[in-house]
Image (tube, rainbow, N blue to C red):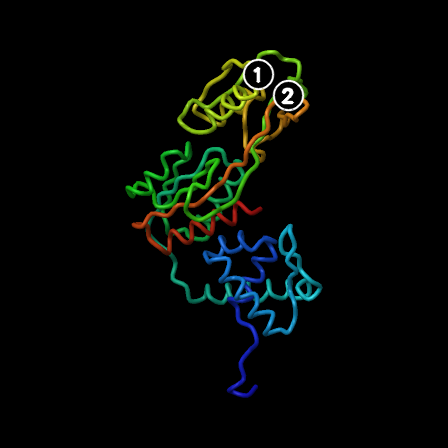
């Protein structure tokens, strides 16, 4: 190779390509890469110009790979993985501590993957995890009580977008509620939308209800639903064994979507916080 010859692509462009391919959406990919949508659009265009090929077709449903994109994807993943492994040879292990706030409405497997994934990769970092209602996490990030927090809300909670989750009506499997005149509700007893939303929606619909179960814990709420004593709201991934999702035929109102974001304190260690954010994203994408 002539010493003045330049390669048509670089690893950063390949990483952007892989992330867009995995997400199928420029906005989501940009959030995961910590860049603007216009920035990754420019990177994609540079990659396509360097290769002389169109890698994606933009559609109303998102980014669809062309045959050229399909041919590049497996090789690009291998190249990116090899570069990451090479970088590990020269990376100093992280040490220190981090305080993390996670929502208790996560699927249990997501919580487990976050904690296991981070501790295995960064055994020298001490992690203090708080799991519970996210309504106070924003203030805790502001005061420095937490370094990283995952917050959820019906509106954008701010910070770095993580994902969205469907909210559903859930109840014990096999039970029907369409003919129940007064709906028995299981609600969370804490200041957040999980407490107020079901009552507001049923009030708006004009359907009668009574509070049959209250708890500050999602685990207890799920137990009450499995016992068949009430109907309640859950994130769709939390509808596990013994539970069913109620449909419109059950006469319950439609529900909005929950938005999750990652907040990072200005006082947090940048390297440790970045590593934790990566662990959270990896665990949430499976």
Rendered position, 244 above or below 286: above
| Residue that appears at 64% across and 51% down | 60
When asked about the image quadrant of residue 146, the answer is top left
Q: In this picture, is 161 found above or below 186?
A: below
* Among the two numbered marks 1 and 2 on one chain, the one whose residue lies closer to the N terminus: 1
Image quadrant holding the N terminus, namely bottom right
The reply, left or right, for residue 203 in relation to residue 58 is left
Left or right relative to 268: residue 253: right
Measure the C-alpha gap from mark 1 to mark 2: 9 Å
Check disc 1: other Cα within 10 Å, few if <14, some if 14-19, many if 20+: some
Left or right position of 261 against 237: left
In x, y percent, where is residue 244? 64, 26
- The label shown at residue 251 is 2
Between 86 and 251, which is closer to the camera in this rendering? 251
Residue 62 image position (x, y, % from top left): 62, 53
State the residue in front, 15 or 219.
15
Q: Which mark is residue 207?
A: 1
- Name the mark on residue 258: none
């Amino acid at each position: 190779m002539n010493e003045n010859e330049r390669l048509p692509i670089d690893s950063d462009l390949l990483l952007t390509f892989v992330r867009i391919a995995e997400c199928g959406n420029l906005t989501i990919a940009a959030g995961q890469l910590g860049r603007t949508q216009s920035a990754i659009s420019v990177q994609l265009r540079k990659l396509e110009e360097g290769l002389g090929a169109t890698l994606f077709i933009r559609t109303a449903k998102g980014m669809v790979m062309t045959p050229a994109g399909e041919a590049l994807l497996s090789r690009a993943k291998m190249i990116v993985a090899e570069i990451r492994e090479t970088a590990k040879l020269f990376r100093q292990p992280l040490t220190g501590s981090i305080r993390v706030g996670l929502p208790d409405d996560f699927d249990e497997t997501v919580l487990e993957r976050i904690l296991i994934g981070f501790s295995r990769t960064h055994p020298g970092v001490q992690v203090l995890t708080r799991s519970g209602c996210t309504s106070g996490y924003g203030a805790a990030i502001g005061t420095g009580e937490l370094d990283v927090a995952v917050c959820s809300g019906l509106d954008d909670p701010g910070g770095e977008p993580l994902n969205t989750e469907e909210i559903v009506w859930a109840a014990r499997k096999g039970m029907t509620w369409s003919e129940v005149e007064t709906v028995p509700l299981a609600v969370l007893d804490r200041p957040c939308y999980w407490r107020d939303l079901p009552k507001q929606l049923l009030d708006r619909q004009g359907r009668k209800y009574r509070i049959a179960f209250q708890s500050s814990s999602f685990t207890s709420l799920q137990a009450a639903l499995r016992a068949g004593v009430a109907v309640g709201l859950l994130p769709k991934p939390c509808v596990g064994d013994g539970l069913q999702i109620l449909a419109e035929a059950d006469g319950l109102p439609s529900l909005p979507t929950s938005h999750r974001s990652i907040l990072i304190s200005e006082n947090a260690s940048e390297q440790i916080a970045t590593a934790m954010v990566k662990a959270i994203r990896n665990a949430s994408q499976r």
